[in-house]
Image: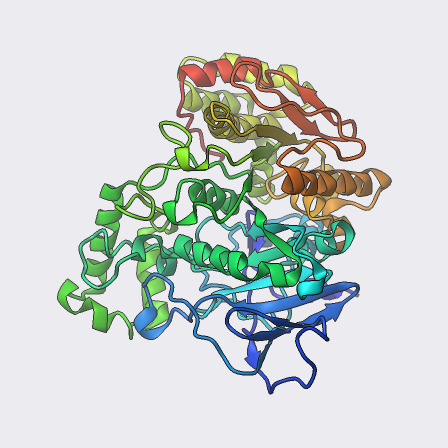
Amino acid sequence: MKPAYLNRRTMLLGGVALAGLMACEKTTPATAGAGADPTLVSTTLGQLRGVPEDGVLEFRGVRYAQPPVGPLRFQAPKKMDAWQGETAANVYGQAATQMRAGAGAASYPPLVQAAMTEAFLPPDNIKREGDEDCLVLNVYTQKTGPEAGATRPVMVWLHGGGFSYGQAPLNIYRGHNLAKNHDVVFVGVNHRLNVFGFLPLDTAGVPGFTGSANAGMLDIVMALEWVRDNIAQFGGDPNNVTIFGQSGGGGKVSTLLAMPAANGLFHKAIIQSGAGIRSGTKEDAEFTGTDFMTRLGIAASIAAEQLQTVPVEEILRIAGEMGANKFRPSIDDVNIPRHPFDPDAPAQSANIPVMIGFTKDEQTLYNVGNPKWVETTEKQVLDAAERAAKGKSKAIVAAFKAEYPDYKPNYLLMQVTGTVRSLSSHHMLASRKSAQPAGVYAYVFAHDLPPQDFVLKAPHTAEIPYIMDNVASAPLFAGATADDVAMGKLMSATWVQFARTGDPNGAEGLPVWPKFDAAKRPTMFFSKESKVVEEPFKAVWTIIQENPNPGASPI
């Protein structure tokens, strides 16, 4: 008999399933006062009724902005109006409209597919395709109300899926265990994605759409404003907020570090497998906006009226023809006035500590379903290395062979196509950040995952259940051995320690972790025997400095 989770629909790519649920529902006022019942919390907009679950108070599907539908489609987010009585916060809100399906998921080896399904399981009763009405967040905490004391660090999670798909409350994304076991207040955020969140009509000169180019990022800013104004009622310290995210979520964190509107809304940042050095250019954004309107066949002069009624399916069809990567944060005159970390780290976040890292075998996730991957030849590895750094292919491959002498060509290819790019972007960002007063700490997640006889090794998304203290929630994906459990306790404690203090040092069992500097590049490698390595991948890094834009692609 198949486990229940294998019978539920998921769409997977890069470790993200597509999902969503109903948003908050209005209810009649409660008889008990907000101070008398920990499940009833007063916010600046009205009362919220959450649900207790296993020692944690959960507030699900909390609206932080007006639904971006009808006349608010492709607009910057608008604040919610206050309500009377109480609003139920007992079901998760819908995911944003999803643009990309889980290409390749069906061809995963069966045990990998089972593990991925388990790990990235969405809540029940979801819309597979998502919904435009998606501006909701979820709060997990132990205590609420004034008597709780607004002293707990707040951790705001930004989900992965690039800027195209994903949602906050997937199985291993949920903040229940961080709240229960580490006494933090956890917030997961849904926001607009793809063409609905990043259509640069304003950049293209279409009147009436100020803020459309970066509406999805402005959604996150409004969610952070909600946190600032309300999180004390959930026991959180509004002056100690950490934003963290993986993959696309890491890119969102990188971007927020350079957004004027986000200045002062958070105090620490963690970037996981998603270093964002540059945003889209204004020139490219202008072309994207113009191209979209041309394909749609609507004149700019009537766009404000006509775009409200175009079916979602038609918008997605045109966006799909253009390509998902066209719709992402881009430079504009107000909201993202500069690239996040190019040519240097943004001055506005000079005093914000950062943790940043990637996984040892990022690209295996995208290749394990390709039957030709296991047939990778030495020549293919050399060819990929040549694309990454012309004339240096043999040196790159030799460096990785020395680092991983037991790796066959298919895994060496993953180093050439994945680690080269990850090392380049993440250590470039860390090097630029290290020139500022606040500390930056670099890591590599090197703990291999068990599915299908460890075929994935340590892939993209691998660290998530460990840093969320959710190993027990995904034993097929993260493993169930004593080493796996210990890794989860170590990493979740380390992430929380950083959220508390801005310094990851102090978790039991963690070696001393020095701040990153551009010369020695000390990096924590999380594995069975975690350790700090100075000048990791030294030979490869030297080549990267000579060829700063590695562009090899996986097969």
Q: Nearer the viewer, residue 337 or 349?
A: 349
Left or right: 248 in relation to 470: left
Give the percent coordinates (x, y) of residue 410.
Answer: 59, 30
Q: Is residue 87 above or below residue 255?
A: below
Q: Is residue 449 visible?
A: no
Q: Looking at the rendering, in which quadrant would you find the N terminus?
A: bottom right
Left or right: 428 in relation to 455: left
Q: Nearer the viewer, residue 75 or 100?
A: 75
Left or right: 43 in relation to 485: left
Looking at the rendered structure, the number of numbered marks drawn on it comes to: 0
Q: Is residue 473 visible?
A: yes
The coloring applied to the image is rainbow
Give the percent coordinates (x, y) of residue 138.
Answer: 59, 63
Q: Nearer the viewer, residue 461 or 115?
A: 461
> Residue at image x 36%, y 40%?
279
Give the percent coordinates (x, y) of residue 316.
Answer: 36, 63
Give the percent coordinates (x, y) of residue 189.
Answer: 53, 58
Q: Is residue 452 above or below residue 119?
A: above
Instruction: State which quadrant residue 546 falls in.
Output: top left
Q: Nearer the viewer, residue 536 or 9?
A: 536
Q: Is residue 444 above or below residue 77?
A: above
Left or right: 342 in relation to 304: right
> Residue at image x 73%, y 51%?
470
> Residue at image x 86%, y 40%?
482
Instruction: State which quadrant residue 404 falls in.
Output: top right
> Residue at image x 29%, y 48%?
334
Q: Is residue 85 above or below residue 422?
A: below
